[in-house]
Amino acid sequence: MTEQRTRASLADADTILSVRNLRTYFYTRDGVVPAVDDVSFDIRRGEIVGLVGESGSGKSVTARSIMRLVPVPGRIVSGEMIFQGRDLVGVSEGEMRQLRGAHIGMVLQEPMASLNPVLTIGDQVGELFAYHPDRAPDGSRDDAVAEILQRVRIPDAVRRMTEFPLSFSGGMRQRVCIAIATACRPELVIADEPTTALDVTIQAQVLDLLLALRAELGVSVLFITHDLGVVAEICDSVAVMYAGKIVEYNDVESIFARPQHPYTKALLASLPRLGERLAHLPSIEGQPPDLGDLPPGCSFSPRCPAAIDRCREQAPDATAIPGASGSGHVRCFVAADMLAAGAATANAAPSGSTP
Amino acid sequence: MARSDALVAERDFFLPPPRRLGGLRRALRIFVRYPVFPIVIWTTVLLFAFFSPLVAPHDPFTLSLSDRLIPPAWEEGGSTSNLFGTDHLGRDIFSRIVYASRVTVIVVSVTVLATAAIGTFLGMLAGFFGGVVDAVLMRFVDFQIAMPGLLFAVMLATVLQPGLRNVIFIIIFFFWAGFARLVRAEVLSLRERDFVALSRVAGAGWGRIFLRHLFPNVLSTVMVIATLEISSVIVFESSLSFLGLGVVPPTVSWGQMLAEGREYMSVAWWSVAIPGLAIFIVALSGNLFGDWLRDVLDPHLRRAGD
C-alpha cells in the first residue's frame, strides 16, 4: 500500500520525523475508538506541517502520540514514528522524557492555563534546564532565560522574567509558552492550536513569531489547527484529517490550488473570501461521525456529495498524488480514479502537470 | 484560577484609593485586618515555654500545704505573690501555667509539622496517581472519620502507656488523614490543569512535577489547615491529659491541671477556670489566625475586609 511513500522517505535524509501507519486506539467501556487510524506523514528540517481537521478528528491525539502522552485509556497500537533514527513507539519512558522539551517542544492551546500561577516567568522557563541538565547554559541561568525571552520578542525581558503569569496578557503568555517549547533549541515543535484562544491581531503576531523562530533556529513545526486561513499563511504542507485518518496530504500550494478529496474541497469552499458577498457561508452537510461507531467504507461517505456505491462498502487506501513534496496522498476512490484518468491523458500528450 | 487572579487584579485597579482614617478607627482597623490577638497570645505562650524559669515567680512543683487554695490576687484573701492563686497542694497556678505551656508548644509544633508532612505527601500521591494508592489511603481516611476519635485514643493510650511521646504519637495518628483528604482533593483538580500537562511535555519527571508545580499550589491550603489544626491539637491533648492518659506528673499540662482542679471546683473555682481559660484562649488564637490566613491566601476573598 505504501511502497511509494516509503521509498520517498528513505530517499529523504532531511526528514526530522517520519510517522508511518500510526494507530492510536482508545479502549473505552463502550468499545474501541480508533482516534488515530493509519496516519502517515513526514516533517522535514525547517518545514511547517499543518494538521487540519474538525474537533475530534484525531489531530491532538496524533500530537499526544508523538509525545507519547496519550491519555488513558488510549494506547498506540501499531505504526512507527522515526525521529532522529529512533522509533518513538519503542523508546523507554526515561529516554522519552529526555526527548520531550529538549528535542521535541510543545505549545498548548490555552496560554492562560498553561503557566503555573505561583512561579515567576523566569523560573518556569529556567525549569527546562533542570529537566535537561545537558542543555543548561554554561553561564548564568538568568542570562540564558532573558535571552530566550528576548528571542520570543518579550519586551523588557530582564524585568518581566521576575513577574508572575497573572501580570501577562494572553498573547504574552503564549510567547512564554513558545519560549518554553524552544528553550532547549529542539528540532521539532508541536503546536497544538496555539492561536485558537487568541484574538486575531495577537494570532498574527504569534504566527509571525513562529515563522521568525523557524528562520532563526531552523526548527520544524507540526502545526495543529482547524483554521485553514492560518494554514495558508504559515504551512509548507498540510495533512487534512477526518475521523482519525489523513484523507489528504500534500504541499500547501497543491492543496489550495488542486484539492483532491471531496472533504478538502468542501472545507476550502466554506472559507469566506474577501470581497465576496454570500447569503450564507457554504457548510458541509451532516455531522462528523462518532468515532466509536464509524460508517462502513469511507468515513466521509455519508456526507460526501461525490460518493459512489463503492465508497459505502470499502475503505479507500492512500493513493499518491502529484505535488512538490512527492509524498502527497489522498484517500478517495473518486479522486484516485480521476487522477488515474488525468495521468492517462497526461501520458498521451506529455505536457506534464507533475513537477 | 489564573484567570480569576487577573480579574481580581483588574478589579483592585479600579477601586478608589483607601481613605485616611482617624486614630481610634485606624487602631480598630488594624485589629480587624491583622491577627493582632493571636500573634500576641502566641508570642506570650512561646516566651513562657522558652523562658519558663525566668517568667515563673515560683517553682511549679514545690508543695506548700500552708498555702493551699489561695485565691487569685484580685480576690479577697489573694496576694500578689500568687497571681492566679494556688492549687490544692499549694503550688503556684501561674507558674504551673507557664511551665505547662512547654507541653503545649512541643505537642503542637511536633504534631502539626508531622501531620502536615505525612498528610501532604500521601494526599499528593493519592490525588495524582489515583488507583490502588488512592483507594487504600481513602479507605483508611474513611475509617478514621467514622471512628469516635477520643474513644479510640483512650484505647490506644491505655495500651501504649501515658506519656508525652505517646500523646504525640496518638495525635499524629489521628490528624494526618484530614490533611491527606484535603490535599488529595486539591491535587485532583490541579493535575488536570494545563501547566501540569505543559511540564510533562517539557520533559519533567514526577519528582519535579510534585515539587515545583503541585506542592507550591497546595502550600496555601496546607498552611491554612495546619493553623486551624493547632486549636484541635491543643484541645485533644488537654482532653487526653484530663482523662489521665496524657502527660504524666511531674510534667504539667493544662488539661492535667484541669483534671486535678476538678475536685476542688466548688471551693476554688480558679483551679479549673485558669487552665481552662488558657486552653480556650490559645485554641481560639489558632482559629482566628487560620481564618485570617485563609482570607489572605484566597484571592477571591482578598479585599473583603474593606
Image (spheres, coloured by chain):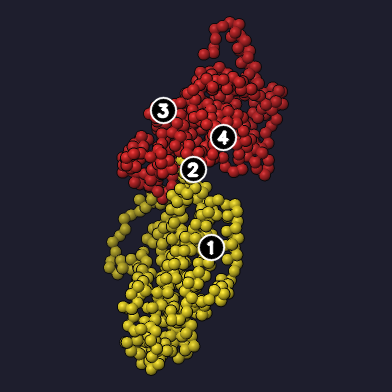
Chain colours: A red, B yellow
Mark pair 1, 2: CA separation: 29 Å
Q: Nearer the viewer, mark 3 or mark 4?
A: 4
Q: Nearer the viewer, mark 4 or mark 1?
A: 4
B17, A234: nearer the viewer: A234
* Subunit of label 1: B
- Position in image of residue A328 (x %, y %): 56, 21
B115, A94: nearer the viewer: A94
The answer to whether residue A154 is seen in the rendering is no
Q: Residues within 10 Å of mark 1 (few under 14, many from 20)?
A: many
Question: Residue shown at 46%/34% (left/top)?
Answer: A103
Look at the picture and state if B277 lies above or below B124: below
Look at the picture and state if B20 lies above or below B59: above
Q: Nearer the viewer, mark 4 or mark 2?
A: 4
Q: Are marks 1 and 2 on the same chain?
A: yes
Q: Are marks 4 and 2 on the same chain?
A: no
Determine whether label 3 and label 1 are within 8 Å by CB.
no
Residue bearing mark 3: A218
Mark pair 2, 3: CA separation: 24 Å
Determine whether label 2 and label 3 are within 8 Å by CB.
no
Where disc 3 sits, the SS reads loop
* Subunit of label 2: B
Label disc, if present, on residue A89 of the rendered structure: 4
Where disc 4 sits, the SS reads loop
Residue bearing mark 2: B200
Q: Residues within 10 Å of mark 4 (few under 14, many from 20)?
A: many
Residue bearing mark 1: B177
Determine whether label 4 and label 1 are within 8 Å by CB.
no
Q: What amino acid is found at the position of numbered circle 3 in the picture?
A: Gly
Q: What amino acid is found at the position of numbered circle 4 in the picture?
A: Val
Q: What amino acid is found at the position of numbered circle 2 in the picture?
A: Arg
- Position in image of residue A6 (x %, y %): 57, 22
